């Protein structure tokens, strides 16, 4: 990975101070990782501050991040592999670029934002930058995953029996939204995402994210200011992924 001088020369924020991290409540309430915010706050002093801006423990994002920077610098290993392999599977299956793009982004929320209702969060995150059909497919792949469609060879995933238990029943809102999706003109776009949504735990050759550069160029409107720094209604969501440890 090339680092240009401007990137290397950029000073780190809060240098010389200890930076306290208060993990986001949404990921820790109800878990043993619950933190004592008051106790942490008691550590504050001129030498100890709350983390704001680039966390030196994370790979540094460029000042104007592009979609692929999030693949390289933020996504966890499983999401990284899963998105790239799903998109390549769709491409090899001869699907159009909207479907390939939806596969490439379908679990983007799991990459480094939030897992719960990931299809809905992911769709909202990308909506300003992709065709409406792509965002729609990302949203509706989530409810459609729970419902078989034998006419196109889609069965209830074996992995879900393991994840949720064999007797899991999806909540009413997912049943309703799957029904909405089934009756929509873009149903097969979202359904194709679920068909290509396979975990390749033993995938020996994961494509480089750059493999999709041209498809992304044609199907993702990268803002000039960089993701997170334009005026789109979801810029804050990209900034949260750039600076996930910000106190505020
Ligand atoms: Fe998903
Ligand atoms: Fe997936």
Image: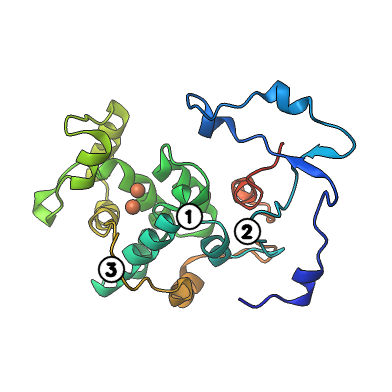
Q: Give the left or right position of residue 48, taking residue 69 as reference.
A: right
Disc marking residue 117 = none
Q: Give the left or right position of residue 180, taking residue 102 as reference.
A: left
Q: CA distance from mark 1 to mark 2?
A: 19 Å
- Quarter placement of the C terminus: top right
Residue position marked by numbered label 3 in the rendering: 89
Q: Are marks 1 and 3 in contact (CB under 8 Å)?
A: no
Question: Residue at the spot x=22%, y=44% of the render?
Answer: 182
**SS at mark 2?**
loop
Question: Mark 3 or mark 2, which is nearer the start of the sequence?
Answer: 3
Question: Residue at the spot x=28%, y=26% of the render?
Answer: 172
Task: Find residue 60 and report its horizontal and vertical position in percent.
Answer: 67, 61
**SS at mark 1?**
loop
Disc marking residue 227 = 2
Question: Residue at the spot x=90%, y=37% of the render?
Answer: 46
Q: Is residue 32 above or below residue 84?
A: above
Q: CA distance from mark 1 to mark 3?
A: 20 Å
Disc marking residue 76 = 1
Q: Is residue 228 above or below residue 216?
A: above
Queried on whether the Cβ of the residue with tag 2 lies below 8 angstroms from ligand 1, the answer reads no
């Amino acid at each position: 990975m090339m680092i240009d001088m401007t990137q290397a020369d950029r000073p780190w924020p809060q240098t010389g101070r200890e930076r306290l991290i208060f993990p986001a409540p949404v990921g820790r309430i109800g878990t043993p990782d619950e933190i004592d915010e008051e106790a942490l706050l008691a550590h504050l002093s001129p030498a100890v501050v709350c983390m704001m801006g680039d966390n030196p423990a994370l790979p540094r994002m460029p000042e104007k991040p592009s979609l692929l920077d999030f693949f390289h610098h933020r996504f966890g290993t499983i999401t990284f592999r899963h998105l790239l392999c799903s998109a390549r599977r769709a491409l090899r299956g001869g699907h159009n670029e909207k479907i390939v793009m939806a596969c490439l982004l379908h679990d983007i929320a799991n990459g480094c934002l939030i897992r719960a209702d990931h299809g809905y969060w992911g769709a909202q995150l990308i909506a300003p930058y992709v065709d409406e059909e792509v965002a729609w497919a990302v949203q509706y792949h989530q409810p459609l995953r729970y419902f078989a469609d034998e006419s196109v060879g889609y069965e209830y995933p074996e992995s879900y029996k393991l994840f949720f238990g064999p007797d899991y029943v999806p909540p009413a809102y997912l049943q309703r939204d799957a029904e909405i999706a089934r009756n929509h003109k873009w149903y097969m776009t979202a359904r194709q995402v679920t068909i290509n949504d396979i975990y390749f735990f033993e995938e020996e050759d994961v494509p480089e994210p750059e493999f999709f550069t041209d498809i992304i160029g044609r199907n993702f409107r990268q803002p000039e200011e960089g993701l997170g720094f334009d005026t789109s209604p979801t810029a804050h969501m990209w900034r949260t992924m750039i600076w996930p440890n910000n106190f505020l």
